[in-house]
Image (cartoon, rainbow, N blue to C red):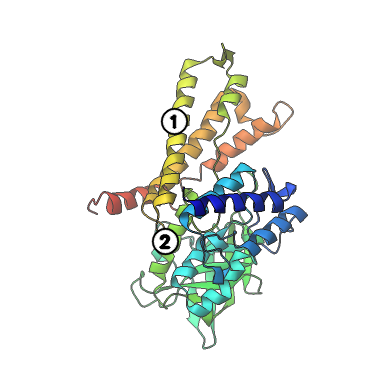
Amino acid sequence: MGDELKDFRLETRDWLETNCPAGARGPGFIPWGSHKIELEQDTRLWLDRMSAKGWTVPTWPVEYGGAGLSRAEYMVLGEEMRRIDARVPLTGRGINYIGPTVLEFGTDHQKEKWLPRFARGDGGWCMGYSEPAAGSDLANLQMRCVDEGDVYRLNGMKIWTSDGIYGDWIFCLVRTDPDRPKHEGISLVLVNMDQPGVRVRPIRLISGSSPFCETFFEDAIAEKDDLIGPVNGGWGVGKRLLQYERSVHSGVNTSGQQVEQKEALLADVAMRYVGAREGRIADPAFRTRLTHYEMDFRAYTLTRKRVIAETQASAPTTATSILKMKGAELTKEQAEIKQAAMGIQGFGWEGPGFTEDEIDANTNWLVTRAVSIYGGTSEIQRNIVAKRVLGLPD
């Protein structure tokens, strides 16, 4: 490690120790910018301090609210934050999805207008891609966007809008030319959700409360200047944004600080429910299953670190599809192992016969069924790997 990087580590360590409030350390809520969610005092203070430092988006240019850190400095910052168990100050679709997309495709005016807002968490962002008849076949989307001179007028519907009831803004793929081939008549536009023409309705899932919503656009308005990329050129821009999304899901985000996926303490759960003998899990078959999971998780973690270190210019690569797919498998396996360890107690839904942890295990099992669907299904990721990594024919 060079002297400059050593100095950066020491300065970073000192600054974090001095400026990270006690209430921003350890597990807790990570803001994503929504004006509709009130932050606790320490959480707000931490966000404001990190934003002023440029460390909510540490690799972004200074003029757009970042700190212009190198990849090596970025990794040091993450290590030092983990050392004191400091929470990531800001997450979400603003700095992780649409932010890097604007940085790559936006005009100078759009970058000056939006990027500093993303960096300081000024507004919570939603994603308007899927429609009832346009899921994996996303290019079949039908939401209309009509040029009316000074503004665009929007009519249509989006589904699976995560956090829709708390969103302030939404970036949408829309149909700007219905007469062109379906991949060519699409644009990406930013829309204010706090207007009469936007209506949000929550979707309740089997797991209970859900972040998902339906979003209806009824003569909603979008500013002409808020169309990102060329008119009718949104398919390429939208696909690039999906790569940024998958980077987050795969754990190789290089825009904002990475929210670490921590290994669950499954051995402790297994020892308690399955039983222990001579200081280890009594059931050899269960012990073998857990060992395989832990080996896979650690290999996955090391691979993520290598990809972050090797990725150039903060740009996602095809490795994100591999890691997103494998991460989904590990997340589901983790939930299944915990539930299996608990036996029948892991299927509790309510009532005095189950602990809160047992009920949470069952609810979490239901929630994790979706991880291989959202952010691009595992089937889609396999197709990407087949075509772009292995070079297989269609």
Give the numbered dot on residue 295.
1
Helix, strand or loop status at disc 2: loop
Determine the secondary structure under disc 1.
helix
Q: Mark 2 or 1 closer to N-term? A: 1
Instruction: Give the Cα distance between marks 2 and 1.
Output: 31 Å
* Mark closer to the observer (2, 1): 2
Residue type marked 2: Ala
Q: Is residue 325 above or below residue 264?
A: below
Residue 166's quadrant in the figure?
Answer: bottom right
Q: Residue at x 69, y 28 (%)?
A: 354
Residue 9: mark in rendering: none
Residue placed furthest toward the left: 393
Q: Quadrant of residue 187?
A: bottom left
Is residue 132 rendered to the left or right of residue 10? Answer: left
Q: Is residue 375 visible?
A: no
User: Going by the image, does 37 lie left or right of 91?
Assistant: right
Whether residue 309 appears in this view of the structure is yes
Residue 18: image x %, image y %?
71, 51
- Residue 274: % across, % down: 57, 18
In this view, the residue in front, 92 or 364, is 92
- Residue 237: image x %, image y %? 42, 68
Q: Residue furthest right?
A: 41
Please, what is the three-letter code of the amino acid marked with disc 1?
Met
Location of the C terminus by quadrant is bottom left
Residue 192: horizontal and vertical position, in percent?
Answer: 61, 72
Identify whether 314 is placed above or below 102: above
Name the image quarter holding residue 168.
bottom right
Which of the numbered marks, if any, corresponds to residue 313? 2
